[in-house]
Image: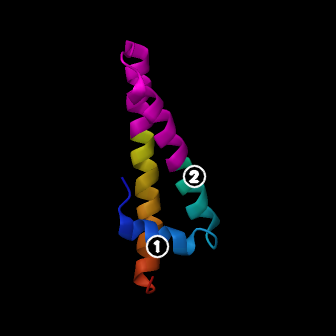
Amino acid sequence: MIIDKDKELIAQWIDKDPELRKYYEEHQRLEEQIEEFVRRPYLTTEEEIEKKRLQKMKLAVKDKILEILEKYRKVGG
């Protein structure tokens, strides 16, 4: 989950930083895919594996977003 403080920084820079936009949109897309699995009452083994794969991808993308945001924090947000 991206915290509110980070969301404010994202809103400030998303139109100016194509890389940030790309990763943020990817994060949102992965979140939606994971939510589809969460809403199901039962997951097959394959679906559970896919859900975990998506969660790992989402975490990696979040790390990229936080790296970019850290750069903006250092220059005064």
Total number of numbered discs in the rendering: 2
Depth check, front residue: 18 or 40: 40
Q: Which residue is drawn at 46% across and 60% down?
A: 65
Please tell me whether mark 2 sits on a helix, a strand or a loop: helix
Label 1, on which residue? 9
Along the horizontal axis of the image, is 19 left or right of 46?
right
Placement of the C terminus among the 4 image quadrants: bottom left
Marked residue nearer the N-terminal end (1 or 2): 1
Give the quadrant of residue 55: top left
- Which disc is residue 25 wearing? 2
Image location of residue 5, percent across then percent down: 37, 70
Image location of residue 27, percent across then percent down: 50, 49
Q: Distance between the residues labelled 1 and 2?
A: 15 Å
Q: What residue type is labelled 1?
A: Leu
Queried whether the magenta region covers residue 41, the answer comes back as yes
Q: Residue at x 44, y 34 (%)?
A: 34
Tell which residue pokes out farthest to the bottom in this image. Answer: 76
Image location of residue 54, percent across then percent down: 45, 35
Look at the picture and state if 12 lies above or below 2: below
Colour scheme in use: rainbow
Would you say the magenta stretch is mainly helix, strand or loop?
A: helix
Q: Which residue is drawn at 50% across and 34% down?
A: 33
Q: What residue type is labelled 2?
A: Glu
Crowding at mark 2 (Cα within 10 Å: few <14, some 14-19, many 20+):
few
Please tell me whether mark 1 sits on a helix, a strand or a loop: helix
Look at the picture and state if 14 lies above or below 22: below
Image location of residue 24, percent across then percent down: 53, 56
Give the quadrant of residue 71: bottom left
Read off the magenta span. Answer: 27-55
Give the quadrant of residue 37: top left
Queried whether the magenta region covers residue 38, the answer comes back as yes
